[in-house]
Image (cartoon, grey):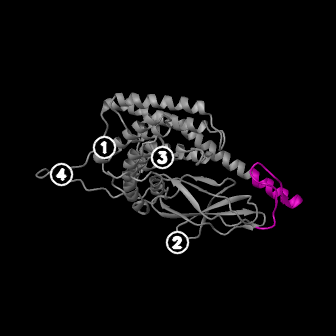
């Protein structure tokens, strides 16, 4: 699960212009690190020094969201009673409350061990929403209201584990509540089937010991873990709005992170996630190819050393490899090397088809990787005959 979640968080920060890094999304990334450390303190030892700050950020977000929601709804209700219509505010345009909002069409989500971040689009029909209500159900009991918010997202910590849950959203205003949205279903911290340990012929099987990194690698691994967390936080700070970015600050943060990754590599500590993250934020085409190639090599080595034991982990490993090949092919495409682009994109497409086939068992949403690869292949000139 951690590997899958890290990959998702990395993708959240990959294209801020297309996927706005909201306060809820940033808080979810912090909550992810906290829960990973709580479940496996040894593996996520690098997180320990950052825990007080991470917990402070999450608590601040949850408190701020609750206070802003309460204040906004009180303003809406008071204004409706006095003048019968809703004034313009920072979040809502002026509109008389005569009809209930239309239905929210779809709800999507990110999730961790025991938390869920759900998000949706504003309804296009009906009256202007005052806010949204998020419900949870197990299908065997009545829906439970788990959040009331004014933004189009809700971070839900401390959710039930190992139960198949369904979440849906309604929009509301002074005239009423919309029909329920489509559902987002998942099982948090689902038990993963482990492969039985097989002893060598003639050797009595004993208890399987937990794998540990060599003692001499722990300091640099902790340093690398701290570096990627700081990098993600700094990337969020560079975004001043949906279309505004502090490019200088981003370049400085990327260079600091690059130095940390290269330092670890000099000490023979390399992780696919750290190389992939660096590649995503590197602008120079030649460097991007090199970093994505290194991420691909590391991912293949990691998968060979520790084969995935769940559908989600298997999906994540294949997706990372397909994405690396796609990005390398895309650089070649934009730099005018069609034959090299075709080679990498073709290999990426074959893997992406395997990724798509594993989406349902892994319980993940489609990110259209196969479609994006196929679209780029169609833009290549036809192969010349020998």
Q: Is residue 216 left or right of residue 90?
A: left
**Residue 278 seen in the current view:** yes
Residue at the farthest front position: 386
Taking the image as drawn, is residue 47 in sight? Answer: no
Secondary element at image label 2: loop
* Residue 245 at x, y percent in the picture: 63, 37
Instruction: Report the residue marked by disc 2.
Output: 140
Q: Nearer the viewer, mark 1 or mark 2?
A: 1
Seen at 33% across and 58% down, the residue is 193
Please state the extent of the stretch shown in magenta in the rendering. 71-99
Using residue 246 as the reference point, say whether residue 266 is left or right of it: left
At label 4, counting other C-alpha atoms closer than 10 Å, the crowd grade (few under 14, some 14-19, many 20 or more) is few
Q: Position of residue 226 (x, y in %)?
A: 47, 33
User: Percent x, y for residue 150?
Assistant: 70, 54
Circle 3 crowding by C-alpha within 10 Å: few under 14, some 14–19, many from 20: some
Label 4 secondary element:
loop
Q: Earlier in the sequence, mark 4 or mark 1?
A: 4
Q: Which residue is mark 3?
A: 35
């Amino acid at each position: 699960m951690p590997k899958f979640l890290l990959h998702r968080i990395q993708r959240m920060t990959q294209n801020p212009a297309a996927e706005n890094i909201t306060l809820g999304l940033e808080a979810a990334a912090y909550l992810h690190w906290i829960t990973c450390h709580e479940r496996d303190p040894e593996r996520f030892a690098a997180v320990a020094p950052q825990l007080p700050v991470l917990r402070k950020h999450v608590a601040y977000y949850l408190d701020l969201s609750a206070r802003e929601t309460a204040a906004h709804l009180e303003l809406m209700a008071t204004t409706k009673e006095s003048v019968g219509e809703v004034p313009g505010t920072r979040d809502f345009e002026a509109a008389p409350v005569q009809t209930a909002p239309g239905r929210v069409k779809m709800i999507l989500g990110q999730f961790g061990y025991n938390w869920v971040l759900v998000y949706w689009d504003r309804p296009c029909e009906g009256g202007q929403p005052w806010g949204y209500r998020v419900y949870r159900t197990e299908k065997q009991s009545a829906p439970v209201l788990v959040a009331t918010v004014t933004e189009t997202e809700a971070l839900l910590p401390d959710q039930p584990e190992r139960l198949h849950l369904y979440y849906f959203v309604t929009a509301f205003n002074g005239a009423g509540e919309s029909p329920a949205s489509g559902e987002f279903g998942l099982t948090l911290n689902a038990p993963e089937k482990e492969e039985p340990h097989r002893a060598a012929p003639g050797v009595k099987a004993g208890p399987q010991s937990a794998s540990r990194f060599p003692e001499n690698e722990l300091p640099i691994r902790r340093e690398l873990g701290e570096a990627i967390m700081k990098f993600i936080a700094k990337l969020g700070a560079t975004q001043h709005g949906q279309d505004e970015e502090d490019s200088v600050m981003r370049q400085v943060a990327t260079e600091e992170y690059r130095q940390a990754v290269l330092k670890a590599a000099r000490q023979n500590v390399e992780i696919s996630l750290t190389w992939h993250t660096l590649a995503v934020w590197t602008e120079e085409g030649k460097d991007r190819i090199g970093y994505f190639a290194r991420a691909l090599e590391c991912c293949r080595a990691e998968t060979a050393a520790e084969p995935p034991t769940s559908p989600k982990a298997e999906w994540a490993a294949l997706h990372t490899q397909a994405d690396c090949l796609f990005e390398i092919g895309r650089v070649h495409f934009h730099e005018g090397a069609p034959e090299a682009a075709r080679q990498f994109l073709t290999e990426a497409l074959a893997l992406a088809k395997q990724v798509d086939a594993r989406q349902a068992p892994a319980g993940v949403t489609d990110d259209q990787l196969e479609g994006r690869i196929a679209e780029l292949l169609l833009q290549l000139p036809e192969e010349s005959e020998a």
